Image (spheres, rainbow, N blue to C red):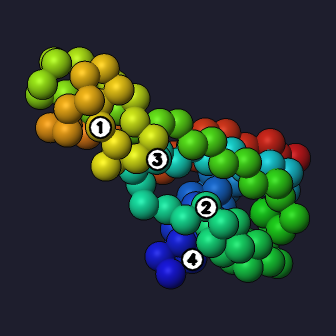
Amino acid sequence: MHEMALCESVLAAIEDSARANNFTRVRRVRLEIGRFAGVEVQALRFGFDVVTRGTLCEGAELVVLEPPGKAWCFDCSSTVDLLARIDPCPQCGGHRLQPVSGDQMTIKDLEVE
């Protein structure tokens, strides 16, 4: 389950930020996870609860934003939003698409004390 490793990386980044910005408690974490990132959100939520036990993030609310992926269509030369990599172009129905975004996972912001 690579979601557990992702949670450990998120926690490490938050702990680094806490040292740099002098906060001791995190109330909310907002993550943006693109639709093409290959992250199972339910597994990530479970992993976050496990990994954050006994840390400054214990009990923090995890908010996951899931923006659509974007792809460039070779058939109609449009950049389009897609919910899944295998979806056809919503403009022309073509299947020759090159993903251009949507595979990222980013800490958007934190609510801290």
Q: In 3D space, how far apart are the residues under numbered discs 3 and 4 (Cα atoms)?
A: 18 Å
Give the mark nearer the N terminus: 2 vs 3.
3
Q: Seen in the image, is 93 located left or right of residue 2?
A: left
Who is closer to the viewer here, 21 or 5? 5
Who is closer to the viewer here, 76 or 110? 76
Give the mark nearer the N terminus: 3 vs 4.
4
For marks 2 and 4, give the one nearer the viewer. Answer: 2
Point out residue 82 in the picture as x, y percentages from the top left corner: 40, 36
User: Which of the numbered marks, if any, corresponds to residue 35?
Assistant: 3
Residue lying at 12% horizontally and 25% vertically, measured from the top left: 75
User: Which of the numbered marks, if any, corresponds to residue 88?
Assistant: 1
* Vertical arrangement, residue 48 with respect to residue 27, above or below: below
Q: Seen in the image, is 51 located left or right of residue 68?
A: right
Give the mark nearer the N terminus: 3 vs 1.
3
* Vertical arrangement, residue 100 with respect to residue 55, above or below: above
Q: Seen in the image, is 3 located left or right of residue 20?
A: left
Point out residue 15 in the picture as x, y percentages from the top left corner: 65, 61
For marks 3 and 1, give the one nearer the viewer. Answer: 1
Point out residue 22 in the picture as x, y percentages from the top left corner: 75, 49
Q: Secondary structure at mark 2?
A: helix
Who is closer to the viewer here, 22 or 3? 3
Number of numbered markers: 4
Residue lying at 47% horizontally and 36% vertically, measured from the top left: 68
The amino acid at mark 2 is Val
The amino acid at mark 1 is Pro
Residue 100 visible somewhere in the drawing: no
Residue lying at 53% horizontally and 72% vertically, measured from the top left: 3
Q: In 3D space, how far apart are the residues under numbered discs 3 and 1 (Cα atoms)?
A: 15 Å
Q: In 3D space, how far apart are the residues under numbered discs 4 and 1 (Cα atoms)?
A: 32 Å
